[in-house]
Image (cartoon, coloured by chain):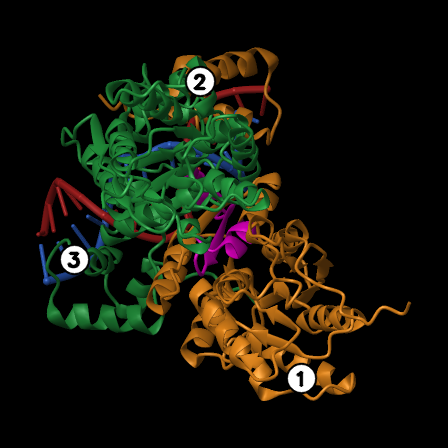
Chain colours: A green, B orange, C blue, D red
Amino acid sequence: MLKKAKTIYDIAREAKVSPSTVSRVLTGSARVSDVKRAAVTRLLDKYQFQPNALARGLSESNARILGILVADIRNPYYAALVVECEKAAYNRGYTVMLCNALNKNELEDTHLEKLLAQRADAIIQIGCRADDLVPDPDYVAHVNRVNNLIPMIISGRLPGANCRSVYINHAEAMRMTIEYLISLGHEDIAIFGGARRVRSTYDKFQNYIYLCERHGMLPREEYIQEGDYTVNGGYDCMTRLLALKRRPTAAVAVNDYSAVGALKAASEQAVRVPLDCSLISFDNTFLSEVVSPKLTSVDYDYPAYGETLVSLALRAIAGEDAPREVLIDAKLVIRDSVQNVKPTDL
Amino acid sequence: MLKKAKTIYDIAREAKVSPSTVSRVLTGSARVSDVKRAAVTRLLDKYQFQPNALARGLSESNARILGILVADIRNPYYAALVVECEKAAYNRGYTVMLCNALNKNELEDTHLEKLLAQRADAIIQIGCRADDLVPDPDYVAHVNRVNNLIPMIISGRLPGANCRSVYINHAEAMRMTIEYLISLGHEDIAIFGGARRVRSTYDKFQNYIYLCERHGMLPREEYIQEGDYTVNGGYDCMTRLLALKRRPTAAVAVNDYSAVGALKAASEQAVRVPLDCSLISFDNTFLSEVVSPKLTSVDYDYPAYGETLVSLALRAIAGEDAPREVLIDAKLVIRDSVQNVKPTDL
DNA sequence: ATGAAAGCGCTAACAC
DNA sequence: GTGTTAGCGCTTTCAT
């Protein structure tokens, strides 16, 4: 039932030429006489011939495969970013090999090895231990070993690792967010939903504190609620915030999931968003648009983000000296979850 | 900077054995003396050696790669299913090569060829043209050609294609759903959110009509609202349903996205779910739990679904005569979006 | 312009 | 047990 796939030898025999000629037609690496080229091309079409990528990769020692290792593809934030990476890769003739670590360290290591074994030309890692504030030494060692063999790009920052890295300008994003809220008259601003042990969240919290002080607001410890990035976590955070004697007038969620949970908590307690409490989320995934009210959210220009990751990878593959670090800018997408609380000056 | 990866020849030389001995240690295909095995193992560990999967795949003519081609990984339904397939594949020592068709026919074809080129051992296709009610002949031809070379499994039904297929028992799912609503006293039931040209939706609509008739309810054409599976589409459908002089007391969404949109439309028109209108969705993705009220939803046992797809693929690879078609059962997950409207018999 | 031949890294059949 | 050798399917010198 299953026929064996044709090889260039089969084509060559039938076209009465040598395998090299078929290869030349395939790769366009050298000129072939019109008559032979026509004969070969006809057979290529006839059999819808596909050169064996394994053999090709083996002989070229470059398979044009880009490995992407992601924490959990089910998370809309990761899915959005990964899809942009895929598009960028396809546009440059690379095939993406996508691996899901499912947030398990062990699986992360396994996949890294698997990608090495498949001779991916480079690996882009998104999430997982690449997010740790305090890097896991084992992981750093692993990354460095991999990076010795093929270029590795992480989306995040990993002190001690000598791979390249691309990360979001969280300081700037936070500044934008807090100053936007302040400009609308908010003085009691909370932040919630993430864990300090995650670098991006740590940075957000730190910048939040810094910005509070800079704008003459007391950074209150109870306005910083740690969570676990899930809907339920966000729900719990918001519940705690709403239980405070001095309720915040605005809250910033470190991701969309947390914001969605917060929205639930608010609605259950008859706290209206944004009338009674404003809400801003980070990541601007489709969830921001799906819930009501639609969430004002920090967006990252995902296409550019993916493009940057991929182009860095390909430049590293090509041996060009690509920058070690690239910052991605954020911008605020204004929707319906923030209220102006400035006293009107009638 | 980038060192070349070690080969079994390097290991062999350093261990003063032959490459075959290294290979034997690697594969466990034959016995090796303890002393040589120890020497080789030490070096394998020392260099964290990874055999080149391309070369291995080339010589074994089986790379243990499972190709998965999915319509759009950003859709939570697909993401959930794909992740279960991945888990099943990893458990059996297969690596998954995940391709995203982004709902583009052209990309779908390209990926199919790419997977062929990478010599995937089998391909699982989820969504895209595999969902068409009236199969695209070009696509069917493509599938059949691929299926001649390697086993192909689609999640869906594709008349004319001789690949294997796994699909949900939509008739039964629909029966369960409608009879559940009827048991709670609903007599005006609508269905919405999908397009008739998609087989699963067509089946749902047809079964809906059949069930209405069977239960003595007039199937009203205006209770069937076609949509495009998006949140906005669901919003529009619900808006139309709520504009009807005879509003339904319950509505069934063909997927979660549509249901979420419907929820928005209802909330904007101050129609309370489930008090004023009950809502049931299909697919039971995380969205069902995220929105409020939480949605009662048709669930598919995703782990079993993924497991079935993968095991069918692997059995086909092994040449066992696996069934051509497998049905996946559905069950209803009861949450908070359905109201009992039966007159209480005090 | 074209064919012969070497090599990519591995496995497996074959000798010893 | 262990080494030698012949592929796996392709690309790419190197001759001609």
On the image, which quarter does residue A20 sit in?
A: bottom left
- Residue stretch in magenta: B53-82
Is-magenta flag for residue B122?
Answer: no
What is the crowding at mark 1: few (fewer than 14 residues within 10 Å), some, or many (at least 20)?
A: some
Q: Residue at x 17, y 69 (%)?
A: A36
Q: Residue at x 22, y 72 (%)?
A: A39
Q: Which residue is mark 1?
A: B209
Confirm or deny contact between disc 2 and disc 3 (CB under 8 A). no
Q: Residue at x 35, y 38 (%)?
A: A120
Is A266 placed above or below A321 here?
A: below
Circle 3: residue type: Gly
What distance separates the C-alpha of mark 1 from that of mark 3?
58 Å
Q: Which mark is residue A28?
A: 3
Under circle 1, the secondary element is: helix
Q: Which residue is mark 2?
A: A221
Is A246 placed above or below B115 here?
A: above
Circle 2: residue type: Glu
Image quarter hosting the C terminus of chain B: bottom right
Foreground residue among A4 and B108: B108
Seen from this angle, which residue lies furthest right? B346
Left or right: where A81 falls relative to A223 = left
> Which is closer to the viewer, label 2 or label 1?
2
Position of residue A191 measured from the top left corner of the image (x, y, whole percent): 41, 29
Confirm or deny contact between disc 2 and disc 1 (CB under 8 A). no
Position of residue B316 measured from the top left corner of the image (x, y, whole percent): 61, 58
Circle 1: residue type: Ile
Foreground residue among B308 and A288: A288
Q: Could you tell me how many numbered marks the image carries?
A: 3
Foreground residue among A2 and B101: B101
> Which is closer to the viewer, label 2 or label 3?
2
